[in-house]
Image: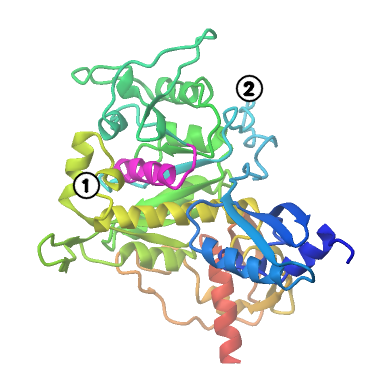
Amino acid sequence: MPSLSQDQVLEALSGVRNPDFGDEGIVSLGQVGDIRVCAPIVSVAINLPNVGSAAAGHLRQQARDALLSLPGIARAEVSVRATVPESKTARVGGPGPARRGPGPAPPTPSRPEGVRNVVAIASGKGGVGKSTLSANLAAALALDGARVGLLDADVYGPSQTTMFGRDDRPKADEQRRLLPLEAHGVRFISMGMLSSKETPVIWRGPMASRLVQQFFSGVVWGELDYLLVDLPPGTGDVQLTIAQTAALAGAVIVTTPQAVARTIAEKGLRMFQPVQVPVLGVVENMDGFVCPHCAEVTHVFSSGGGESVARDLGLEFLGGVPLDPRVVVAGDEGVPTVIRDPESPAASACRAIARRVSLAVARVNQGQASGIAEAMDVADGAIAVRWADGGTDRLDFETLRNNCPCATCVDEWSGKRRSLTLLLPSNFGPRRLVPVGNYGVQIHWNDGHQTGIYSHQLLRRLARRQRAAA
C-alpha cells in the first residue's frame, strides 16, 4: 500500500473545527504541524495560539478519530500544545503616531526584544482593583504554561512589589540594562524596587513617562509570551506614553459593578482609540461578595455594570471577579490569590479571565476576532458592511442612528437610552465613516451628531436584529 502524504493527512484533518475560533478548521487556521507518517502510525501536533484552551481535549479526540479513518492507519498520536505567536498588529514596525505641530516626531511603536505580545491593563479611575487583577492575571497565565512578565507602570503608587512579595533592588547586566525580579513564575519590574516605602515619588509627568519607557525598553525581559502592563488609573501622561510608544496587542479595561462603570470604561476605551489599539474586553471587579460559610452572594456594589457596558459598547465581557477577603490577605502576603487559594471563587474567576485574554490576543493575531469588519461603504440609504468571514450586511441609517451608543444617547448612570426613536428626514445620512482601531467606526451624521463609536460587534448585533425583524 502506498504511503500517505502530508496533504492526505491535512485533508483528513480539514474537518476538525476549533470552537475557540468560530468553528474554523485547524488546517485553515494553520494550527497543524509536525506531521509524521510511518504506517500504521501517524502523529501530528496541534499548535494552539492561546494557553489554557478548554477545547484542547475535544480537538485531540476529533483529530485522532479523523486520522484513524485514513487507510492503513491503526494508531494515531495527537499532541496539543500552546505555541503563542508574536503580535501581528499593524502598528508593529509601522509608522508611529501622527505628528502634530513642530518638534521631533514621536517614536515608532515597538515591543521589547523577545516579547511576543504586550497587553495593557487599564481603568478610567482608581480604586477598581486593577493592580490586584493584573498580578493575578499574570500568575494565572504562568500557571497555564505561558512565559509572562509584568511591568508596573504606576510610578506614584507602585504595588506589584507587595503583590509578589519582593522589593529588592534589581541588578543590571554589562550593558547597564535592568534585570527584572521573578516571583511565582512572573518576571516583573516596578518603581517600588527603586524607591523606599517612606519616600513619595514627587515627579512631573515627563519624568514619570521617561522612567516607564526605560522599564519598557531598557529591561532585559527575555523570551516572553505576554508582557502585561499595569497602567496607572486614569488617562494621564504615563498611560498615553505607553499607548503611543508600545506596540500593544490589545488592552483590557477594568471596571466595577456600579452604573458609573460606563463612565470608567469609556474613559479607558477612548484612551486607546487614537492609536488604534484593540480593546480585548471588559473585566468587572468586586462582582459580589461570596460568603465563605454559606457561599451566598451579596452584591455590595450593585451588579452587572461591567457586563452591561461591555454589551453596550460592543466589547467582549471577559468576566467578573467576586469580592473575597482572601484576595486582600494574599496580596499582603506577596502571593497572588490564584496561587495561595487556587480553589477560591476569585482565583477561579481570574484563571478563566486570563484564558479569555489569551484567546482574545490570539484572535486578534490570527485575524479571527469575532465580527471583524473588513470594509464599509455607503449606498442607497444604508451602510454595507463586509465581514472578515466573507459575509455582508446592510444596515439602514435609521437603525444605526437610533442605536447610537454615545453618552448623549445613552444615560451613563443607568445604561438606558435617553432619547425616543427619531423621525429622520429623507435626506438624512452619514457624512463620514471614521475607523476606530480595528474594532469600531465613528459615524459622522449630517445632523451634526458624531460622537458615537459603533463597535464591529454592535454592528453585527444590529444586523442580526434587523434580519430577524425582516
- Give the percent coordinates (x, y) of residue 121: 42, 44
Above or below, comparing residue 459 to residue 470 in the picture: above
Q: In the displayed image of the protein, which residue is found farthest to the left?
A: 293
Q: Position of residue 444 (x, y in %)?
A: 60, 62
Q: Which image quarter is the C terminus in?
A: bottom right
Q: Position of residue 58 (x, y in %)?
A: 55, 67
Depth check: give the residue in front, 384 or 44: 44
As drawn, the label of residue 58 is: none
| 146 left or right of 328 in image | right
Mark 2 surroundings within 10 Å by alpha-carbon count, few (fewer than 14), some (14 through 19), many (20 or more):
few
Res. 126 visible in picture:
no
Magenta stretch: includes residue 236: no
The location of residue 264, given as percent across then percent down, is: 35, 53
Hey, which residue is sitting farthest top in the picture? Answer: 174
Task: Please state which amino acid type lies under the numbered disc 1.
Answer: Val
Is residue 20 left or right of 70 when viewed as pictured? left
The reply to whether the magenta stretch includes residue 132 is: yes
Here the colouring is rainbow
Q: Nearer the viewer, residue 306 or 380?
A: 306
Q: On residue 104, which mark appears?
A: 2
Crowd rating for badge 1 (residues with CA inside 10 Å; few <14, some 14–19, many 20+): many
Q: Quadrant of residue 11?
A: bottom right
Report the magenta residues as a range: 130-147
Q: Which residue is mark 1?
A: 327
Callout 1: helix, strand or loop? Answer: helix
In the rendered image, the residue lying farthest to the right is: 2
What secondary structure is the magenta-colored segment mainly? Answer: helix
Judged from the image, the secondary structure of the residue bearing numbered disc 2 is loop
Rendered residue at 62%/44% (across/down): 85
Query: Residue drawn 19% across and 65% down?
Result: 299
Which quarter shows the N terminus? bottom right
